[in-house]
Image (spheres, rainbow, N blue to C red):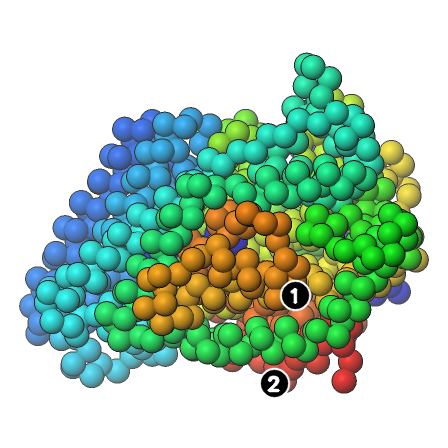
């Protein structure tokens, strides 16, 4: 998920197959009908206004900040004797939310527009909006008025008090207690940081690595890839775009020639090196300097203070303990792959290279577990998979998704859906789908919030809007888009973020779903990845596109699960290496951060935790999470442990992963409450027991 800045059983299988069958696809419904229904339910379903030109981008941002500045000025100028929660903290939340919406929309334009000039303007403008947002922390007039209200010691309910406490903490974290000159310097540095974050992300989006190969050099690569749009070139060669994830994966998994795999691996791990290593070096030093000025030992301590882990040391300890605990399993898995390579190459002393892991893992799945990931793609045509996932989420969460005619879409093929409560028909939000790659588009997979829900001044609920940006293989002239099982996991995960946004019902924007601590925000989506490994779930939608009667055999699904567990040591260590790369850059004293060789530092982590990268490569230059998830990537693994624990509630439920009662409890206790209470409390209310790591240990194949 892409989070915004401050401004995501077998016995009942047949029953579920019947109940989840979708009606034939119809023409999109009318948005206006849902808007009228929302109004009757005291809600507001209003889509964001997307700019159509670069001038409109600038105008939207300038107008948003102008209106907000006027409203904030009026807030600050109020008579201190007449201050209330409504005209201080609630008003501040609503005013800043409107600018936040513009920021989110323009951030999406920057990542998805087909017009490079608009992408460039949007990137420049979002930097200015981030700078404006940073500036709010240093407005003494606003702080004075808000503090004056706090000093009256008002009696507030829990959600109101939480909003007050967190807003006042943000002032403290911004350095308002510093002398004026030092405070001004921190403000300037934070604005510089916003610009560098955007520059880092822009450089990644602009990075390209086309490599041309002969058919012989692509031996082993499936015909489905070779026949994909844009791959076959006029000269008879085949173009692989190392910057496109599914291209790189197709080669890593399947190319028989080591040299082909090596070339793509090196190209992908050299993307944006020249442009981004200088930027990242400055980012790391600047973050350390800001942390020092604010009184924190490290940038990680500053960032993690508001999260579940609380300190950088806790995050490092969590990651390193898992690294150590997984060492026996990881070592055994690596030796299995090395032995497989030795047998395959007839070289007893064969050494595993970074470009060997995917290839020999794929061979292991085929040889030992009879799992052919390429052959499985026939069971996952994109549209049927999407419809099947929709049906599952509608069932367990009590929802209905309806495609509507979009007043505006930013590219051909973008679709708009309205989410409604199935029981009442009341709209709950809307989401866009932008699912296939194109030049200039964000090149990974993420949910981009467009509007965040909250109660308006007139009491109506402003419904959320989200956009899902993905890069699944596009359909060809004679074959639908066919997904790998891993793609299906990604789809269920990313759409889980959409659900998080749609189902959250916080009064205040600052407490809505995605406002939860960053080391928890992935958990509700990671939990939903478990659905894709379950026979009862897969039988509801996974079928051979050439013969819909043909389902994935139970033995094959069991083999997929066994194969996943057999390779979970490496997969988890890989994830841990990414978190430790991040912490290696940010859980260090400012003096060390200021002189760090970021490539040497991060490549050393890869060498220690997984496998030594190819010489002269710089994976970290293309590690987009370093701009926005900095000192936060450990949260994926932290959240994964929580996610597996939460998924165990479905696993043991009467209806398994399709159990509606458990789904409703998840909707109410996790998604619905957002950040209105401590997320640890939410998890335990959903589980009905204390949290446990036992389900996660079982998941990775480690049993105590």
Local SS, label 1:
helix
Residue 99 point in image, percent of width and height: 29, 49
The quadrant of the picture occupied by the C terminus is bottom right
Q: Closest to the observer: 611 or 580?
A: 611
Which residue occupies 69% across, 61% down?
571
Which residue occupies 68% across, 19% down?
233
Which residue occupies 35% across, 61% down?
595
Residue 356 point in image, percent of width and height: 75, 50
Residue 238 point in image, percent of width and height: 70, 25
Which residue occupies 79% across, 35% down?
221
Pair 1/2: label in front: 1
Residue 534 point in image, percent of width and height: 80, 60
Q: Residues within 10 Å of mark 1 (few under 14, many from 20)?
A: many
Query: Taking 413 as reference, is 160 left or right?
Result: left
Local SS, label 2:
loop
Query: Taking 148 as reference, is 638 left or right?
Result: right
Q: CA distance from mark 1 to mark 2?
A: 27 Å
Q: Is residue 30 above or below residue 394?
A: above
Query: Taking 190 as reference, is 225 left or right?
Result: right
Q: Earlier in the sequence, mark 1 or mark 2?
A: 1
Location of residue 537 by image quarter? bottom right
Q: Residues within 10 Å of mark 2 (few under 14, many from 20)?
A: few
Residue at the disc numbered 2: 690
Report the label total: 2
Q: Is residue 60 above or below residue 297?
A: above
The answer to whether any part of residue 425 appears in the image is no
The answer to whether any part of residue 638 appears in the image is yes
Residue at the disc numbered 1: 573
Q: Closest to the observer: 68 or 368?
A: 368
Q: Closest to the observer: 309 or 67?
A: 309
């Amino acid at each position: 998920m892409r989070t915004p800045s401050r401004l995501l059983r077998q016995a009942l299988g047949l029953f579920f197959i019947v109940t989840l069958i979708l009606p034939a696809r119809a023409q999109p419904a009318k948005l206006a009908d849902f808007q009228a229904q929302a109004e009757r339910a005291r809600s507001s379903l209003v889509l964001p206004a997307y700019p159509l030109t670069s001038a409109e981008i600038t105008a939207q941002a300038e107008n948003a900040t102008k209106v907000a500045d006027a409203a904030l000025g009026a807030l600050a100028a109020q008579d201190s004797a007449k201050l209330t929660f409504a005209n201080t903290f609630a008003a501040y939340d609503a005013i800043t939310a409107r600018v936040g919406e513009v920021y989110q929309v323009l951030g999406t334009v920057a990542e998805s527009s087909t017009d490079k000039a608009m992408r460039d303007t949007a990137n420049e403008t979002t930097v200015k909006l981030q700078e404006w947002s940073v500036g709010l922390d240093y407005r003494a007039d606003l702080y004075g008025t808000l503090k004056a209200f706090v000093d009256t010691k008002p009696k507030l309910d829990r959600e109101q008090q939480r909003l007050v406490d967190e807003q006042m903490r943000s002032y403290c974290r911004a350095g308002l207690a510093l002398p004026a000159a030092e405070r001004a310097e921190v403000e300037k540095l934070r604005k510089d940081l916003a610009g560098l974050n955007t520059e880092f992300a822009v450089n990644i989006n602009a990075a390209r690595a086309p490599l041309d190969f002969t058919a012989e050099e692509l031996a082993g690569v499936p015909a489905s890839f070779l026949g994909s749009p844009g791959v076959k070139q006029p000269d008879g060669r085949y173009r692989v775009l190392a910057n496109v994830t599914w291209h790189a994966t197709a080669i890593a998994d399947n190319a028989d020639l080591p040299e082909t795999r090596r070339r793509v691996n090196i190209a992908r791990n050299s993307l944006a090196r020249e442009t981004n290593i200088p930027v990242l070096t400055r980012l790391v030093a600047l973050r350390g300097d800001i942390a020092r000025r604010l009184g924190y030992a490290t940038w990680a301590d500053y960032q993690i203070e508001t999260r579940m882990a609380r300190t950088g040391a806790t995050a490092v300890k969590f990651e390193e303990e898992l690294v150590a605990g997984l060492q026996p399993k990881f070592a055994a898995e690596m030796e299995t792959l090395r032995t497989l390579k030795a047998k395959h190459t007839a070289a007893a002393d064969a050494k595993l290279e970074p470009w060997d892991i995917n290839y020999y893992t794929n061979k292991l799945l085929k040889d030992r577990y009879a799992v052919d990931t390429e052959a499985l793609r026939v069971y996952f045509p994109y549209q049927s998979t999407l419809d099947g996932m929709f049906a599952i989420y509608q069932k367990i969460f009590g929802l209905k998704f309806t495609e509507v005619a979009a007043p505006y879409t930013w590219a051909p093929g973008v679709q708009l859906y309205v989410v409604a409560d199935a029981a009442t028909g009341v709209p709950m939000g809307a989401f866009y789908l932008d699912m296939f790659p194109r030049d200039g588009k964000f090149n990974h997979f993420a949910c981009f919030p467009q509007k965040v829900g909250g109660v308006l001044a007139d009491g109506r609920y402003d419904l959320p809007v989200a956009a899902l940006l993905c890069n699944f293989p596009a359909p060809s002239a004679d074959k639908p888009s066919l997904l790998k099982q891993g793609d299906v996991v990604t789809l269920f995960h990313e759409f889980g973020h959409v659900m998080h946004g749609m189902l959250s019902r916080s009064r205040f924007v600052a407490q809505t779903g995605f406002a939860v601590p960053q080391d928890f925000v992935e958990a509700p989506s990671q939990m939903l990845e478990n659905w894709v490994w379950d026979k009862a779930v897969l039988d509801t939608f996974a079928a051979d596109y050439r013969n819909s009667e043909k389902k994935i055999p139970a033995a094959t699904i069991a083999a997929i699960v066994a194969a996943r567990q057999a390779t979970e040591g490496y997969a988890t260590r890989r994830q841990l290496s990414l978190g430790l790369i991040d912490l290696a850059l940010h859980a260090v004293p400012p003096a060390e951060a200021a002189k760090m060789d970021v490539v040497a530092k991060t490549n050393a982590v890869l060498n220690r935790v997984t496998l030594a990268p190819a010489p002269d490569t710089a994976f970290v230059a293309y590690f987009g999470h370093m701009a926005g998830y900095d000192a936060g990537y450990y949260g994926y693994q932290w959240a994964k442990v929580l996610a597996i624990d939460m998924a165990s509630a479905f696993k043991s439920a009467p209806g398994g992963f399709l159990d509606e009662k458990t789904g409703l409890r998840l909707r109410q206790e996790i998604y619905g409450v957002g950040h209105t209470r401590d997320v640890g409390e939410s998890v335990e209310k959903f589980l009905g027991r204390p949290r446990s790591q036992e389900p996660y240990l079982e998941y990775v194949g480690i049993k105590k």
